[in-house]
Image: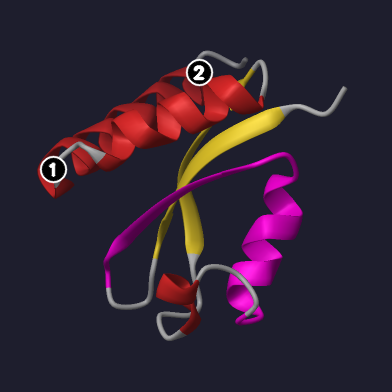
């Protein structure tokens, strides 16, 4: 059973795009090749700034919908907290 991911990418114009997929690397490559979402086609390249794995497609779609309701400031805070957590884990040797 494939794993599903909900993700945010930062576009070249500094905007954020939120989506979900069962193959994150392939989806980001599609965005960067201009074959992803219409929104990202003119805002390439994109870079993943946040992602989370969820149990199934239903959970991914639900989480994506909730993220899309957040303000830009709330999304940026989520990205910042995830970055800080990764830094703490790296410093702890995990």
Residue 64 is situated, as x and y percent measured from the top left of the image, at: 42, 35
Within the image, what quadrant is residue 27 found in?
A: bottom right
| Residue drawn at point x = 66 percent, y = 15 percent | 55
Tell me the mark number nearer the camera, choosing from 2 and 1. Answer: 1
Which residue bears the numbered disc 1?
71
54 is higher (above) or lower (below) than 31:
above
- SS at mark 2? helix
Task: Tell me where residue 13 appears, x and y as whole percent.
Answer: 28, 77
Badge 2: few (under 14), some or many (20 or more) residues near its Cα, within 10 Å? few
The residue carrying mark 2 is 89
> Of all residues shown, which one is farthest toward the bottom?
42
The verdict on residue 27 being magenta is yes
Residue placed furthest toward the right: 1
Tell me which label, 2 or 1, sits earlier in the chain: 1
Could you tell me which quadrant the C terminus lies in? Answer: top right
What span is in magenta? Answer: 14-34
Mark 1 Cα shell of 10 Å, populated few (<14), some (14-19), many (≥20): few
Residue 45 to residue 42: above or below:
above
């Amino acid at each position: 059973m494939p794993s599903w991911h909900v993700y945010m990418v930062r576009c070249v114009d500094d905007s954020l795009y939120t989506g979900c997929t069962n193959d994150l690397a392939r989806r980001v490559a599609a965005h960067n090749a201009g074959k992803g979402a219409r929104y990202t086609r003119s805002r390439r390249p994109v870079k993943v700034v946040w992602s989370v794995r969820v149990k199934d497609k239903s959970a991914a779609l639900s989480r994506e919908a909730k993220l899309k309701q957040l303000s830009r400031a709330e999304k940026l805070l989520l990205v910042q907290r995830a970055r800080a957590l990764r830094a703490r884990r790296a410093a702890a040797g995990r």
